[in-house]
Amino acid sequence: MRKIVKICLYAAVFSMFATGCKGSSAGETTKETPQETAAGTASSASITLGTYKGLTLTAQKMEVTDAMLENQLNYLKTVYPAEVTDRSAREGDVANIDFVGMKDGVAFQGGTGSNFDLTLGSGRFIDGFEAGVVGMRPGEEKDLDLTFPETYDNAELAGQPVVFHVTLNAIKDPEHTQIDDALARRVTGEETATLASLKKQLREELENQQENEWFNSAGNELLAQVIENSEIVCDASSVEEMYTELQMTYQAYAAQYGMELETFLAMYMGTDTEGLKELAEELVKQEMAIDEIIKAEGLTATDSQRESMARMNSFENQAAMILAYGEESANRLFEMGAAYYYLIENAAKAEPGETAGTETNGG
């Protein structure tokens, strides 16, 4: 269940591929003196750090409940359904199939698959395909005479008659799958796995996820207060570089969904390209503020903090995280995470319902 770094330290995530204000004047405390960048050009970036201790923390940590664990187990039933062998396939089953699509007796590109799990009735394949698999039994082979829709995006196949030769390898039934030791073995791939061991693993993963969500929510809340308390001027070129990196990143995601960038931003981010420009400036400010706190307090992540951050991001340990992201990027994430730990440890926890604000002067 590996996922990309979920740290909502946006600047930390993007520091892996964007320079932000690093190397310009992330540690500068006066606005009057331009700094020289690595390229030798003057940077207008500056920061006067305001209060960053005693800030009000309202983010609450959510406990992992039995209901959350049950929801995860029910989800895993749909991903790892049990096989059935004593009946034919029916709608709602997951059919594991091999198939070859042919036009005029010749296999066409993109029309072949093996050990493919297809939920019958999902509508993933062209009309008639899934209905043709319904009624087949494991081991059975069948030719499906079908026609691609006129609107199909491949002009060579649009509106054309084809034949799919299908072999049904197995039938899996999510609806009647039991939450038991057999499910645990399918999920983990370990013959010795039990439901008890799976539940323990899932609870640990859920606890790490909740810890991650709270850590980022708390850190982001406090960092927003730091930025509000500080005087920060970003270098225009650094903001533009960040904006370009954001565009490239979300453009890649949009392409995976077959969307234009604007559509993707509106649907999944609730913003547009103008909002992306504002985000770019905010990310640069975040990184400048974090770097200034690191400098002021001489922060480095402890071994315990590094291990915790690795687990929060679905890695077994910090060594695995370093291996995945590279030593430089992982250490940068650990370093910035140390600033979040510092802000949280030095914050004043608010009572439920209390709004965020500055409690004491610090920094």
Image (spheres, grey):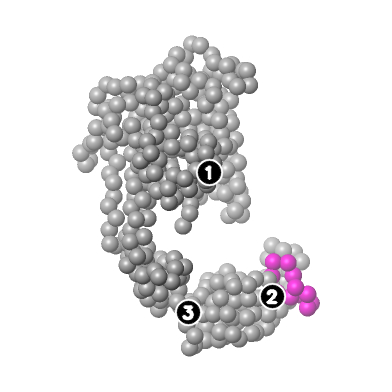
The residue tagged with tag 2: helix, strand or loop?
strand
Q: In the image, residue 335 lies at what x, y percent?
A: 43, 33
The residue tagged with tag 3: helix, strand or loop?
strand
Three-letter amino acid code of the residue under disc 2: Val
- Residue 325, numbered label: 1
- Work out which residue is located at the far top of the displayed protein and give it: 32
- Residue 100, numbered label: 2
Q: In the image, residue 289 lies at what x, y percent?
A: 42, 26
Precedes in sequence: disc 1 or disc 2 = 2
Q: Which residues are magenta?
A: 100-111
- Work out which residue is located at the far left of the displayed protein and give it: 351
> Is any part of residue 77 visible from this angle?
no
| Residue occupying image coordinates x 59% and y 81% | 168
> For mark 1, does the 10 Å Cα neighbourhood hold few (<14), some (14 to 19), or many (20 or more) residues?
some
Of 237 and 339, the residue lying toward us: 339
Q: CA distance from mark 1 to mark 2?
A: 39 Å
Q: Nearer the viewer, mark 1 or mark 3?
A: 1
